[in-house]
Amino acid sequence: DAGVTQSPTHLIKTRGQQVTLRCSPKSGHDTVSWYQQALGQGPQFIFQYYEEEERQRGNFPDRFSGHQFPNYSSELNVNALLLGDSALYLCASSQRGSFQPQHFGDGTRLSIL
Amino acid sequence: AQSVTQLDSQVPVFEEAPVELRCNYSSSVSVYLFWYVQYPNQGLQLLLKYLSGSTLVKGINGFEAEFNKSQTSFHLRKPSVHISDTAEYFCAVSVGNNDMRFGAGTRLTVKP
């Protein structure tokens, strides 16, 4: 039973570019959340998707957007990249309805030059 | 909105000694509480959770935590640590909507 998988593992971009990160949830999970973890800090909630719609959003600008597909996989898009966007981006999945802890992937390390 | 404060950014301890990592939370409603561990270059792994019931929660790898509602705390403990417990530990809170708020983390370093 595969857990949460994220791709790519590492990514290097330059300021102003756009990036797309991908996440496949754990089998049986239908809800995907994205977090940004800057170096030396705890994860910060970006947004959550369920039934292909953004359901909740943290304090992140509109440059951060996402999508969820019918198979529950998800993408995180970041436009007009800034140096401060350098971070580990974590995807977590869970099952809606009955409260269960979120399961995390190993993340995508995004470096902005 | 709910929030979490981890009171120690770093905790050094010798192997086989006991350890306590402190966590306080703030919320106007009932909460669910979690501890996650993060090893280098990896995602977060769930150690234990408090949803309801007994305030003493046992998790994996010999860790346990106690929910104290009056002190709004959820401290993590282990009676005897190993070198392999060296990692970053995160306390997290949720009000049941799957929106988790994390603390800044505590780096546990176990020395031989």
Image (cartoon, coloured by chain):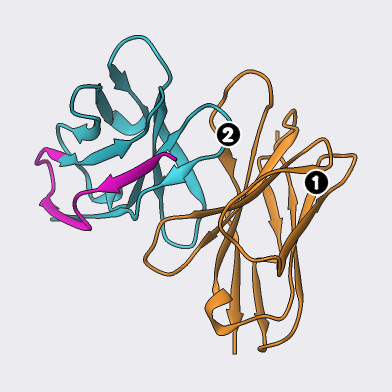
Crowd band around label 2 with a 10 angstrom C-alpha radius: few (<14), some (14–19), many (20+): many
Residue at x 87% of width, y 45% of height? A69
Q: Quadrant of the N terminus of chain A?
A: top right
Q: Is residue B51 above or below residue A32?
A: above
Q: Quadrant of the C terminus of chain A?
A: bottom right
Foreground label between 2 and 1: 2
Chain A's colour is orange
Expressed as whole percent of the image width and height from the top left, the position of residue B85 reads 28, 47
Which residue is nearer to you in this view: A27 or A69? A69
Q: Is residue B95 above or below residue A15?
A: above
Label 1 is placed on what type of residue?
A: Ser
Q: Is residue A74 left or right of residue A100?
A: right
Q: Is residue A66 left or right of residue B36?
A: right
Chain B's colour is cyan
Q: Is residue A96 above or below residue B3?
A: above
For the residues labelled 2 and 1, the Cα–Cα distance comes to: 17 Å
Q: Secondary structure at mark 1?
A: loop
**Residue at the right extreme of this rendering:** A70
Q: Secondary structure at mark 2?
A: loop
Expressed as whole percent of the image width and height from the top left, the position of residue A7 reads 72, 61
Which segment is the magenta one? B1-19
Residue at x 57% of width, y 75% of height? A85
Q: Is residue A20 left or right of residue A45?
A: right
Q: Is residue B16 magenta?
A: yes
Q: Quadrant of residue A82?
A: bottom right
Task: Residue A73: give its label.
Answer: 1
Label 2 is placed on what type of residue?
A: Asn
Crowd band around label 1 with a 10 angstrom C-alpha radius: few (<14), some (14–19), many (20+): many
Task: Residue B98: give its label.
Answer: 2
